[in-house]
Amino acid sequence: MKVLDTTKNFLAIEEKYSLIENSQVAIVSAPYEHTVSYGGGTKYAPKEILGASAYVEFYDDEFDRELCFDIGIAAVKPIKFEKKHGVEALDMIYDQVAELLKMDKFVVTLGGEHSISTAPIKAHFEKYPNMSILHFDAHSDLRDEYENSKYSHASFMARVAEFFPTERITQVGIRAQCKEEADFIKKKKINTYYASAIRRGKHGSNWQKKVVKTLGEEVYVTFDVDYFDPAMMPATGTPEPDGFLYSETLDVFRELIAAGKKIVGFDVVELAPMDNLSHPNLTTARLIYKILNFAFSGK
């Protein structure tokens, strides 16, 4: 499997730390964009995230380590979808992620729009049948279809719910959905932490701990950057007000680790890079590295 060289890979790390055979982590780039409904540009996200990652510091003071040199991080060459979309595109992502999981790699998938997440979730579920899903998002993405597509970014979790136990799905930050989605959440017993409920104190001062208690021992994370407040993350296709900040979000992961949970993989989606605005790209790259630090804490 071909990987990107040191001028294009994650963190711009040298070859001996970024070859697939030397790395515990593999980054899959899925620059897929077919169903965006407001702002576009998510197909440019993987390249821009990798580019921005060259400016992320290797050292993490919280864990007192330079993780990338301890575990190795390989960035696989981007998937070329050409004219393929829908099921065909998802199958391409699934095949690559599944192959890497068979190689015992920890897989990070970069979108692209959120519809891509169905594929890595399916691949991880086959390897980790007891896993839970932790879904950060402004939207619940549970519409059966949107704009005549069952494979819309607004429907990805509805597709996941067709093969995954819904009581093992936990959503955080939701603040925009239709009534049918709200009804689906109640019917299927999805653990949904609405932004308004968190802000009104419904879940107490440590809502992060409440979130973690709903999860099993193994956790897959799917992270839509529009979960963040648009003041800090304007570069996304469907921004929503009343979002979340970086530090309070990391507290969810701190609670995960404190509770002894294991992060088995994750994806980050829906960054839509903007001209002459670099901080969203850098923030996303830093988030990815930080989640990796949490995932490999104690290892």
Image: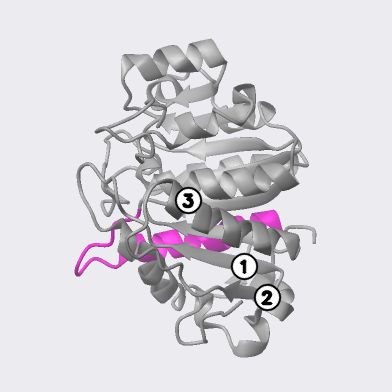
- 217 lies above or below 168: below
From the image, tell me which residue sits under label 1. 26
Mark nearer the N terminus (2 vs 3): 2
Residue lying at 48% horizontally and 33% vertically, measured from the top left: 159
Give the number of the disc on residue 72: 2
- 106 lies above or below 36: below
- Whole-angstrom CA distance, mark 3 to mark 1, is 18 Å
Label 2 CA crowd tier, 10 Å (few <14, some 14–19, many 20+): many
Secondary structure that dominates the magenta span: helix
Quarter residue 140 falls in: top left
Q: Position of residue 58 (x, y in %)?
A: 58, 75
- Element type where label 2 sits in the image: loop
Residue 126 or residue 136, whichever sits in front: 126
- Element type where label 3 sits in the image: helix
Left or right: residue 236 compared with residue 122: left
From the image, tell me which residue sits under label 3. 90
Magenta range is 271-296
Callout in the foreground (2, 1): 1
Q: Amino acid at mark 1?
A: Ala
Q: Position of residue 204 (x, y in %)?
A: 54, 21
In this rendering, does residue 206 appear at all?
no
- 188 lies above or below 286: above
Residue lying at 27% horizontally and 32% vertically, measured from the top left: 148
Q: Amino acid at mark 3?
A: Leu
Label 1 CA crowd tier, 10 Å (few <14, some 14–19, many 20+): many
- Whole-angstrom CA distance, mark 2 to mark 1, is 9 Å
Callout in the foreground (3, 1): 3
- Element type where label 1 sits in the image: strand
